[in-house]
Amino acid sequence: MTMLIGTMGYIIIDDFTIMDAIYQTGITFTTVGFGEIAPISDAGRIFTITLIITGFAVFSMAVGIMVNELNRGHLIRTLKERSMLYKVARLKKHFVICYHNDYTLEVTQQLRANHIPFVVVDPREDIEEIARVHKYPYFIQAEPHTERSMLMSHLSSADGLITLSSSIADNIAIIASVRLFEKEHYIPKPYNVISAAESQDDVDKLKKLGADTVVSATKLTAQRITAMAARPDMENLLEEFIYQSDNPLDMEEIFVPKYSWMVLRKLKETHLRQIANVSVVGMTKKDGEFLAMPDGNKLVTSESKLLVIGKERGITMIKEIVKKRHKPEDLKYV
């Protein structure tokens, strides 16, 4: 603004050309003092003095603001935040975890062990120190339910969101905000939203609001204790089979799209075991009906989910085969 005013002043007062006016304003405003590039009238000199004082005041104020921000740590905090945002912006297929608590520690430990990237979003001031202590590679200081935090955490490229607040109100606000974010930003695939709740009523509420999975710690604990009491020999089977990172076997649900060549074919005709050495131990139909241990004569229906067990390489291979529209040539010889 000062450069513009100075340039216009020299043009009006002393009939400078545009380039001469810009040059004269620049050397005057910055107090360099190369002198007059053309004769200046008394009015022009008064204008020049005013411009010099204005330039000195502007630069002094800028230095003062800079020193003040450095003393308060705002500038360093801003630089750190920008550096973190740059790293987060490069993430894909990650999970956004809302709020730091005991649940977050356990969840992030499992995600880290399975090489799944994640971003922790928490509004508290000491989140940087918390992230350093608990080895969170990516974190954002913001209220998780705001659109700003969703943009900063690069939610548009994430696989899903996990909200682990002990407050049902916080979880409700986040779930509603995420579903609204999907609509406003035209996200093609809905996010996998996972939440925590205490009571069964809270579980039902969160599911109605749009949560895909709601975990109740009370219910899980009761189920585990009951299972241990009924089958003590099976106590550690789940941990050994699913949660151990060095286990060669994996279990995963594979979605069967409408266009898949497997639709309306019998399981035995897909030859999944022969191709990739994986076994189908369950099938969830589109209406939610679950079939345990389906035999080879069961039909693979559209938009169903196949629960398979096998090695990671085999499961990855099956995912690619299921997505094909036509039966692969190699299967014709199986």
Image (tube, rainbow, N blue to C red):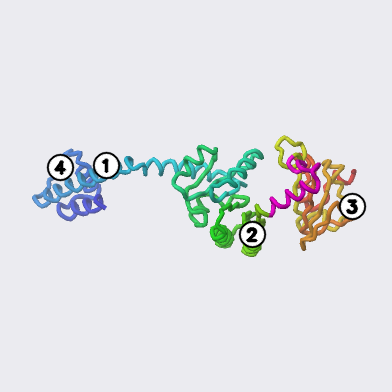
Residue 181 locus on image (x, y percent): 55, 59
Say if mark 2 contacts mark 1, CB within 8 Å: no
Q: Is residue 194 left or right of residue 66?
A: right
Q: Earlier in the sequence, mark 4 or mark 1?
A: 4
Q: Is residue 158 left or right of residue 334?
A: left
Q: Is residue 117 left or right of residue 79?
A: right
Q: Is residue 57 magenta?
A: no
Q: Which residue is identified by label 3?
A: 295
Q: CA distance from mark 2 to mark 1?
A: 56 Å
Say if mark 4 contacts mark 1, CB within 8 Å: no
Residue nearest the viewer, comparing 109 with 193: 109
Disc number lying in front (3 or 2): 2
Residue nearest the viewer, comparing 334 with 63: 63
Element assignment for label 3: loop
Q: Earlier in the sequence, mark 3 or mark 4?
A: 4
Q: Amino acid type of disc 2?
A: Ser
In what quadrant of the picture does the C terminus appear?
A: top right
Q: Which residues are magenta?
A: 219-239
Res. 314 visible in picture: yes
